Image (spheres, rainbow, N blue to C red):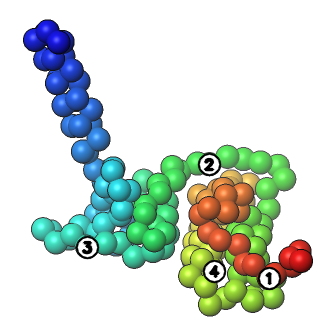
Amino acid sequence: MSASRFFLLLLFSLLVTTQSATAWEARGEPGLIRVDPDTKLAYLVRGDKVEPLWDGIYRMDDGSLLTVHSGVGVRNRPIQSKEPDYLPGRACNRLVERICGPANQCAEREDCSLARQLQAMDQEEIAQNRDRGVRTHADWQCSSTYYDPGVLKPCDLGFGRL
């Protein structure tokens, strides 16, 4: 391999390494939150003290939500849209029923607690929002979580098993 090719390969690998080493940071409810780009683990930064962020749903100062599940942080950008058939709270109510069970059979599960936390955030946003036709950030999160069973595990009641 020629020296110029080796130099270009080395330069390229340094650029890729440098870009992947940058952590994502934002201010949220508990303070400065940092998400490691390689592990996707979420941390709370307080001065020079860094500690893992508890599982939950955190509202960022820019209006986005950060979902932390098993320590892994997933950021959801703020979205607002007007929809004529939108009913406030419907998506989060459906999510809670799916995750906690229709008669609250899975209420003790951590996933149920996270779904209820998101539902409470949705109710707060609905109460603060004067324009009832605008979907809340939490409602969008409930909708996307409802259709992605990898985020929160649905309540398994054992129906349909042989």
- Do the CB atoms of the residues marked 3 and 4 lie less than 8 Å apart? no
Say which quarter of the image contains residue 122.
Answer: bottom right
Q: Amino acid at mark 1?
A: Leu
Q: Which residue is mark 2?
A: 80
Which residue corresponds to the image point at 29% horizontal and 69% vertical from the top-left? 44
Pointer 4 local density, CA inside 10 Å: few below 14, some 14–19, many at least 20: many
Question: Which numbered mark, 2 or 1, is in the foreground of this view?
Answer: 1
In the picture, the quarter occupied by the C terminus is bottom right
Q: Which residue is mark 4?
A: 112
Mark before the other along the chain sequence, 1 or 4: 4
Q: Which mark is residue 157?
A: 1
Mark before the other along the chain sequence, 2 or 1: 2
In this view, the residue in front, 86 or 99, is 99
- Looking at the rendered structure, the secondary structure element under dot 1 is loop
The answer to whether residue 7 is above or below residue 27 is above
In this view, the residue in front, 160 or 28, is 160
Which residue corresponds to the image point at 31% horizontal and 72% vertical from the top-left? 52
Label 3 and label 4: CA atoms lie apart by: 25 Å
Asked whether, in this view, residue 136 is left or right of residue 53, the answer is right
